[in-house]
Amino acid sequence: MKRIIFILVILIICVAISFTMFRKNTKKPLPIINPTDLKKELVDPELLAVGQGHTIGDFSFTNQDGRTITQKEIENKVFVAEYFFSTCKSICPIMNQQMQRIQKTYKGNKSVKILSFTVDPETDNSETLKTYAVQHGYQKGQWHFLTGTKSSLYSLARKSFFVLKPAEATNLGDAGSDFIHTNNFVLVDKKKRIRGYYDGTNPEEITELIQDIELLLNE
């Protein structure tokens, strides 16, 4: 009798593993997102006609540890990007709780990076970001909180990540008055191509994002 029970348990485990692998292997490939796939108001006018080949542009910012971080940091890496600010009391705390989930899942994996760009560089210098990073349990070398000039930060948001909401995009001509406040996380693959947008305040979407990172790691 014990032998029969043992065999049944093994069979159940095998079926469960097979089902999990089947679901993983049958998930559709992630799309490669280009400017023509997005709402026009979210895309910088000079990029509206780009239907393929869009990649994240070059950048140079300072992280919470005072290091200069450039595009070399994410070469041949999968990474998640967000825009936030340290004094935000509404969506940012929720978003960065979810970002902690991502870091926990891939902690120590050198092929996965997290880039959190401030939208308020006048407040968020390296020292301020270091305090914020420590509060959120950042893994040094994996999760970078980045600051720099507002023009550079916002240009990357508009021309690379496309995270401006329609109402914010109306302020494109006035760099002093616009303010990015988006809940979007952007998933980027090893070739610096956008592969997905996820609501950073929605735990279910972040679970999907975590799974999609795994897909990209295995591409």
Image (spheres, rainbow, N blue to C red):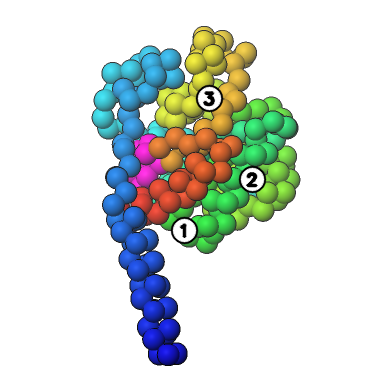
Mark carried by residue 154: 3
Q: Position of residue 161 (x, y in %)?
A: 44, 30
In the visual, does 168 lie left or right of 31? right
Distance from label 3 to label 1 (Cα)?
A: 27 Å
Q: Between residues 69 and 96, which one lies in front from this camera angle?
A: 96
Q: Between residues 126 and 106, which one lies in front from this camera angle?
A: 106
- Callout 2 touching callout 3 (CB < 8 Å): no
In the visual, does 182 lie left or right of 36? right
In the visual, does 94 lie left or right of 172? right
Q: Position of residue 31 (x, y in %)?
A: 31, 38
Q: Was residue 193 drawn as part of the magenta stretch in this picture?
A: yes
Q: How many marks can you see? A: 3
Camera sees residue 131: yes
The amino acid on which the numbered mark 2 sits, given as a three-letter code, is: Gln
Q: Quadrant of the N terminus?
A: bottom left
Mark 1 against mark 2, which lies toward the viewer?
2
In the depicted structure, whether residue 92 falls above or below residue 100? above
Q: Position of residue 159 (x, y in %)?
A: 42, 25
- Callout 1 touching callout 2 (CB < 8 Å): no
In the depicted structure, whether residue 71 falls above or below residue 107? above
What residue did someone put label 1 on? 110
Closer to the chain start, of discs 2 and 3, is 2
Q: Seen from this angle, which residue lies furthest left?
A: 52
What residue did someone put label 2 on? 97
Closer to the chain start, of discs 3 and 1, is 1
Name the residue: 44% across, 19% down: 42
Magenta-highlighted residues:
188-195
